[in-house]
Amino acid sequence: MITHTVRQGTDDWHALRANHFTASEAPAMAGVSKYQSRAELLKQKYTGEIPEVTPAQQRLFDKGHAAEAAARTLAEEIIGEELYPITGTSEEHPHLLASLDGCTMLEDVIWEHKLLNEDLAAAVRAEELPEHYLVQMDQQLLVSGADKCLFMCSDGTRENAAWCWHYPDEARFNRLLAGWQQFRQDLADYQPQAQQVAAQGEAPEALPAIKIDLAGMVKASNLPQFKAQAMAMIEGIRTELTTDQHFADAAETVKFLQKGEKQLEASKQAALEQTASIAELFSTIDELRETMRQKRLQLDKLVKAEKENRRLEIQQKAVKTFDEWLVGLDTPVPINDTFDVAGAMKGKKTIDTLQAAADDEVARAKVAATQEAHRLADNKALIEKHQGDYAFLFSDWRDLIQRDAEFIKLQVENRIAHHKQEEQKKLDAERERIRQEEEAKAKAEADRKAAEKSREEAPPAHVGVDPGAGDDRAVRQPIDTSRITQAASNFQRGSEVAKPETVEISRKEYEALLAAREKLDALEAAGVDNWSGYDDAMAQLRAA
């Protein structure tokens, strides 16, 4: 915080405030002030004119300052440190200013004091302060950078003092800054309107009193002249209403006509007290009274209808203004805005107050929509920052970005972690499948090599079946192929062998023997579970 050595209430202090947006003006900017409308603040900032303080207001201010000075000791006891009044501006937001009733030396605690009233004291004790005060303290905390603010209302005595704490809130800070940003834009676009004095209704010129003197007959009466003047007045009443002045005039005329009806009725009654019946007199009075009544009813309905028309025109214009602005707002998805101009205009009676309420609601809704657009954009950026190569997991990002940032961050982390786990499971399963296949292949190869080695190391033997086994396929003996190999070798060399165990075979027989051996080798390598194939090979060898 940048502190300024100006004393509150001096010309230098007012000059400094005129060039900044102050904490006491923040409620009006936000449209929640009890004392000033947003439109009035815009005009004040545009013209630089500071409203004059009335004697009654000055007396109230003086009383508040006296109570503040008396309560300072109590505030220092609660905080545990000495407090100093400070006027400061924000380093980060130099257009914002706050005048603090009290601030500690380290600027970590601030104090705001208000003059006691029972409603405010009850709100303080319930820790449910009106928004008007919260917005002011938000700016004080933002400008000062303090950790907390002690809010107190009192009359300067300990017995009549109530207090509570208000703390910094990032969301409220953002809303405050967005509100001032919109206010600055509206101030740059501001077009001053011609000053209008509050409309005062004017009824038509008063009619003369009716004079009737009866003595069994009408002795004297100005009724014909009264009728002519009254009818002319009634015809001249305006029925086309467009301004607050017209509405005010019409409302007064309604009252006047109602009074005229009662006047005629009283005159009739006075005449009746003098005579039993005078047809012409009563007929005239009845005609005038009914004419006034009809005009009054017509004008009363017209006032209500035209006021409703003006209300609808203002409302529709505000809706159009906001909708056109919303089209140009940069946002990743459509915004669910909180724009409610009808609600804002509820209870307002005059054209000026209806227009001011509509303008304030448009400004408020713009601020809220801008904040929401920034929040959605930040949430989308948060997803894009953390999703990495897993964008396909967030096809629902339009719905997801509308949740709060913490939820989004957890969702991104959980989805990616779950996806990685599933992918790891698939990878582990594939690796296990490949391992099992390789293991099976290795085992088969080892079995094949073991079989070959067993055949190579086995001693020669005749092929036969144990006759006592009962089934000639039940026992299989190793096949002696040495004689076949020797005979084949001798056949290839064309030599003759004199040894009796050697037999000569033809080429055809040799090829048959080789084929039978290859078949037996294959059966041996495969575990020889195809016994019919084994028997065929054995028969082939025996035949050879």
Image (tube, rainbow, N blue to C red):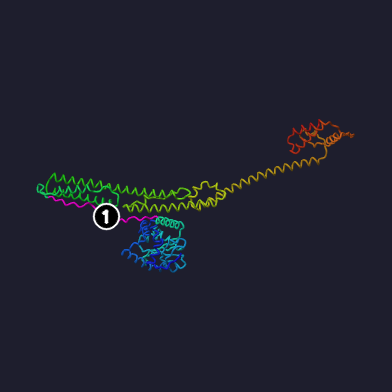
Image position of 24 (left or right of 444): left
Q: Residues within 10 Å of mark 1 (few under 14, many from 20)?
A: few
Examine the rendered structure and indicate whether residue 225 appears above or below residue 29. above
Residue with the mark numbered 1: 200
Locate residue 75, reporting x and y percent: 41, 67
Examine the rendered structure and indicate whether residue 477 appears above or below residue 204. above
Residue type, numbered disc 1: Gln
Residue at (33%, 65%) from the top-left corner?
A: 58
Locate residue 398, reporting x and y percent: 49, 47
Query: Which quarter shows the C terminus?
Result: top right
Examine the rendered structure and indicate whether residue 448 appears above or below residue 311. above
Whether residue 158 is visible to the viewer of this picture, yes or no, is: no
Return the residue nearer the eye: 464 or 213: 213
Image position of 215 (left or right of 61): left
Label 1 residue SS:
loop
**Magenta part, dominant SS:** loop
Q: Is residue 294 magenta?
A: no
Return the residue nearer the eye: 7 or 42: 42
Locate residue 533, reporting x and y percent: 75, 33
Locate residue 386, reporting x and y percent: 55, 52
Name which quarter of the figure residue 176 lies in. Answer: bottom left
Image position of 229 (left or right of 60): left
Whether residue 537 is visible to the viewer of this picture, yes or no, is: yes
Return the residue nearer the eye: 47 or 343: 47
What span is in magenta? 189-212
Image position of 266 (left or right of 440): left
The number of numbered discs placed on residues in the rendered structure image is: 1
Return the residue nearer the eye: 196 or 525: 196
- Considering every residue shown, the one lying at the far right of the view is 498
